[in-house]
Image (tube, rainbow, N blue to C red):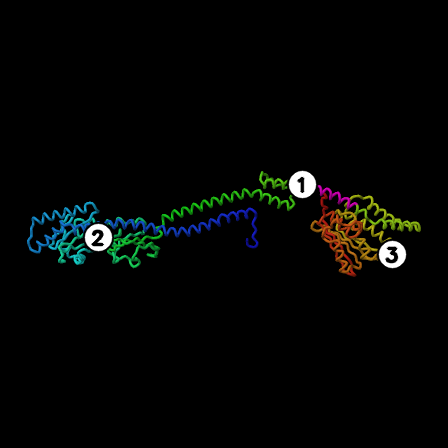
Amino acid sequence: MLPKGWKLGFRNKLLVASLLCLLLPASITLYISNSYTEHILRSQVIQNERRSLEQESMYISNLLSNMVLVSNYIQFDPGITLILKENWQRSKLHQPDTAKNVLEFKEVTEKLESVTSMMEKTFVTVLTSDGQYYSNYPYAKLDVGALLQQPWMEKARQQPVFDLYWAGVLDNYIPTVAQTSPQVLTIARNLKLSSNSTYATVIISIAESRISQIFNDNRKGQETLLIAPDGTVLASRDKTRLGQPFALADELTGTADSRFMDYRNEQYLLSSLDIPYGNYRIVSLSPYREAVSQISATHRWSTAVQIVSGAFFLLILVLLVRQFTKPVIRLDGVAARVEQGELGIRSGVRGYDEIGRLGKSFDHMLDRVEKMIEQIKVEQAQKRKAELAMLQSQINPHFLFNILNSIRLRIMMRGDEENAELLFSLSRLLRMTIQQRDEYTSLHDELHIVRSYVELLNFRQADEVTLDTDCTSESLGLKIPRFLLQPVIENAYIHGLRQESGRILIRTWTQDSRLLIAIEDNGRGMDEVTLNRLRAEVGSEPPELEAMPSSRLAHIGMSNVYERLYLTYGSAFQVTIDSIPGQGTTFLFVLPEEIPDQG
């Protein structure tokens, strides 16, 4: 599932898997929770606003209901209506009775005070057709004439006998309380005779501030308003809005409603509820952000706690995973160093769990491997010595016997110094071959052996082979395996020169801590097929000594040379062969100056 080229270790894979198992369900849960929370928040806000409006509507309805009850009481109280009718008749007949008017005024005023004493502060005014008035409040400075001239008063006097006129919010017409209550909510009712003649008008008012105090405008930007049927504001905590048209009046439906809408570049919740008096409606307008602030704060705190808890759990998880996987990482590092050849290192991981037992077993395995490698080294060293001794003893005895017989016959037939010198060369060669048991010799001594060998070859053949050397002084003292060059000279003599006259050149020099030995002949050379077969025989791959047949080990040739070089230097040497048909062949050995430790 990872992009190509990415590699994760065991610890990182475990961490990624743990994070996915933790974060993926948590993210999905948080997303679903936020989605449902938004829906629940909206429903909760609507319900809260609805309950608040219902409570406020109930309080306002009680106030308006008291006003209606007072007007009904005045209209249907026999004592009050009788006094008002008699006063109207005396006014019509122009028969004033001052003493009786005083007594009647006292009686009506006491009844008005009595009926309003147990309710909210309500201002009751009864105006008669002749300009007299009765009230439950101090009447000093009341300008009845100015009151009768008010436009709303004319509309009130035109109402049917049993209908209430809802005048709305007016400037307070009572001088004694106008300063404390600048606006009042007012209703009016006509009292008429059977002849449809008005004999009195009842005016009932309450302070607008008493209504606006009911509104619960605690949140920033929230407004609660009492709206008249024509869309004007009757009551509000913001007094500048009284009597002004409500901007969203057209959005109000005929029934109770709550919905979200854009207003003032922000989302608002508009809720409304009808009041059963005067076709009034209470309206709440609150910013959604403020309405859900408390619930949102709780949700944010809950989310923050979840995130902090998740982060803390992730930290604990990472620390535990690192602690749990530390032995595994240690084992991996040890295995990598063992792969690089550091067999002496140990993990040191111990414990009573599976990883501890694995570390202990791994260390024991390394102990056994190291012992086996040491044992194999000893066995290989012994085997190498035996094989070198065997290879060194594989010079063809028939050749030596033939030479000896030839010398013997020649000495028998002639007795000259030349034959004596040949016998000396042969003796020297036999001495170096048979008596010397050292595996290595200097290049200088090896060249002496080769020169004796060529002298003996020339003795057997009619045509002589010239042996030339071109060696640097620093190369002559370097050690090489004994009898390294003799098989190459023999190969050049037999296959290159075809046992005829010719020239063999041996050049030696050092370069970059390497000894280079070049053996060149001017023989017939080799074709491509023969050259490739010989290169394959002395190729760069190490021979499988255990798999070699005994016939190959007994063969004296280039494979013998390569086997001895590999047993001596391992893979730290090179053998290259170049040949041109008709021009000759060149063997080049590239050997380390120092012979490796054989253990």
Decide whether residue 318 is among the magenta residues.
no
- Mark 3 is on which residue type? Ala
Seen from the viewer's position, the closer of residues 195 and 144 is 195
Q: Which residue is mark 2?
A: 185
Seen from the viewer's position, the closer of residues 375 and 574 is 375
Mark 1 and mark 3 residues within 8 Å of each other at the beta carbon: no
Seen from the viewer's position, the closer of residues 30 and 506 is 30
Q: Badge 1: few (under 14), some or many (20 or more) residues near its Cα, within 10 Å?
A: few
- Residue 462 is tagged as 3
Relative side of 388 to 140, left or right: right
Q: Position of residue 440 (x, y in %)?
A: 77, 45
Q: Which residue is mark 1?
A: 368
Q: Secondary structure at mark 3?
A: loop
**Sequence-wise first label, 1 or 3:** 1
**Spatial distance from mark 1 to mark 3, Cα to Cα?**
63 Å
Q: Secondary structure at mark 2?
A: strand
- Mark 2 is on which residue type? Leu
Q: Main secondary structure of the magenta part?
A: helix
- Mark 1 is on which residue type? Arg
**Sequence-wise first label, 3 or 2:** 2
- Residue 427 is tagged as none
Decide whether residue 384 is among the magenta residues.
yes
Q: Residue at x 59, y 41 (%)?
A: 354
Relative side of 414 to 131, left or right: right
Q: In the rendered image of this protein, does residue 353 appear above or below residue 492?
A: above
- Figure quadrant of the C terminus: top right
**Spatial distance from mark 1 to mark 2, Cα to Cα?**
106 Å
**Spatial distance from mark 3 to mark 2, Cα to Cα?**
153 Å
**Sequence-wise first label, 1 or 2:** 2
Magenta-drawn segment: 371-389
Q: Position of residue 597 (x, y in %)?
A: 71, 44
